Image (tube, grey):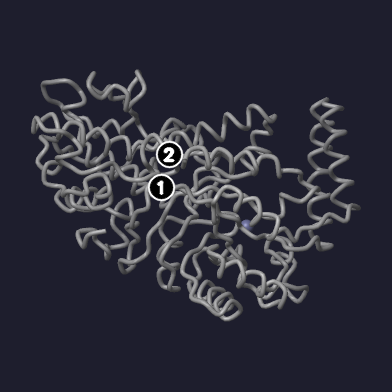
Amino acid sequence: MGSAVPGTLAPDIHRSVNIANSELQSSILAALQRYWPNGAVPIKTLPIPRCSVPDREPLPPLLTRVKLPEWASDLAPSIGLPVPAYAVVDSAGPVWSCTDWWQVAFWYLNGTAERAFEAAHGPIHSYSYRLDGWDPSVWECAWVNRIALFLRRWSARQHQADETELLGALPEVEIAVTHDVDAVTKTPSIRFKQSAFQGFNGIRKLAQGSFCGAQVKFRQAARFLFSGSDYWLFDHIATMEERHGLRSCFNVYGGRGGWLRSPKHILFDPSYNVARSDLSRTLKELALRGWQIGVHQSFDAWRDSELMAAERQHVERALEQSVTTCRQHWLRFSWKQTWAAQQQAGFKLDSTLGFNDRPGFRCGAALRFRPLAPGAKAGLEAVPMVLMDSHLYDYLALESAERYREMQRWLDEVRFVRGQATVIWHTHVLATDYGWSDGFAELLRLLDRGNS
Ligand SMILES: [Zn+2]
């Protein structure tokens, strides 16, 4: 990305990140530059009005829907593209021509509303349910990418030129499969945690009067407690992926594992040590064969750059290679602190930005971009996580056909907008205890079809 993206911004100003209009336009043009490889001039000169931003960000976000003109009607639903109401300026003409698209794109990509919420209430980490009363339509599509496609088309019309000739070809779709390695063996703590969790769900089902549902949960609890399921699934995953010509990324824990930790860490963090010889050997072999390795920072590391750096170094030493990509365990994330800490710890790419409790585009984008982290030097990039195994199996609890449609729906959106995104499938959920292997096979088929 170009040097126009500001890297150092005052941390205390309202809404954490607030930048001048010209800077805002440059930052969006740079963030979306893959949509105009021939140069941004025809986009920059579009007659887009500038809105004024209110002193206080309305929360929950106050949205309005902007219908796109007929020549771009395929880029937004018929009810229109959701934008913050203040981005529409009061002037003559159709609403789409009175909308400050720079501000809209920035509002999404910068997470302006979430940053304001975090400043008032603290981080939600990655639970969308904490954003009570928010219109979920902001997470339903990659709106920023759709705006980029709209601006391309508008610009070609303005110049009466062929869109591809004027701005260059559309970018390639990039959907990366990633595995957060939370467990490599079935430890006593996993047996206890998972059986207690499923037992609790069973009791909840009973209380709701669902005897069948309770029975299923109690059976799962017993399976977690007693079965000898194998959680060492690296070869299995590699073989499945190779069949589809795909190489994923394994994010591995950089703590020391074991029992000499506080009960909280034993409960919430993975228990393995990446320096274990069979594990480091397997990961090194995978890396040699083209798989990527990232760091999966521990539960408490989300704002602790020193802890992150120590975990990164532990993974690097064990694998004898530089590791600069990451995702926070449990998607623990603060807009204000996590990216800044990651940058300080030497990371170059983070894929934490997504929700634990629903699929979707948390910043309205399927785009690898440079976040505006207050107080941090430019360098780190972020790529959103749009879909995860537990969305499908735990939160939505879908049957096979629905699950397939749900996966297709999110992947199709990324493809439609020629976006960049990541998907999580945990390694241990391919074990028979969970039985989420079929879903992974479906995901690989969907990706294979889309990329061929
Ligand atoms: Zn994790």
Q: Residue, x 35% and y 36% (percent of image)? A: 143
Q: Quadrant of ligand 1?
A: bottom right
- Estimate the x, y position of residue 191 in percent, counting from the top left: 83, 56
The residue lying toward the viewer, choosing from 60 and 327, is: 327
Q: Quick one: SS at disc 1?
A: strand
Which comes sooner in the sequence, label 2 or label 1?
Answer: 2
Density class for disc 2 (Cα within 10 Å; few <14, some 14-19, many ≥20) is many
Q: Quadrant of the N terminus?
A: bottom left
- Estimate the x, y position of residue 306 in percent, counting from the top left: 50, 76
Q: CA distance from mark 2 to mark 1?
A: 7 Å
- The type of residue carrying mark 1 is Gln
- The answer to which image quadrant residue 46 occupies is top left
Instruction: Establish if 351 lies above or below 153.
Output: below
For mark 2, what is the residue? 414
- The type of residue carrying mark 2 is Val
Q: Residue, x 31% and y 34% (percent of image)? A: 84
- Estimate the x, y position of residue 284 in percent, counting from the top left: 60, 73
The residue lying toward the viewer, choosing from 64 and 281, is: 281
| Residue 80 horizontal side relative to residue 197, left or right | left
| Residue 29 horizontal side relative to residue 334, left or right | left
- The answer to which image quadrant residue 285 occupies is bottom right
- Estimate the x, y position of residue 203 in percent, counting from the top left: 84, 37
For mark 1, what is the residue? 420
| Residue 439 horizontal side relative to residue 29, left or right | right
Q: Residue, x 49% and y 53% (percent of image)? A: 123
| Residue 66 horizontal side relative to residue 263, left or right | left
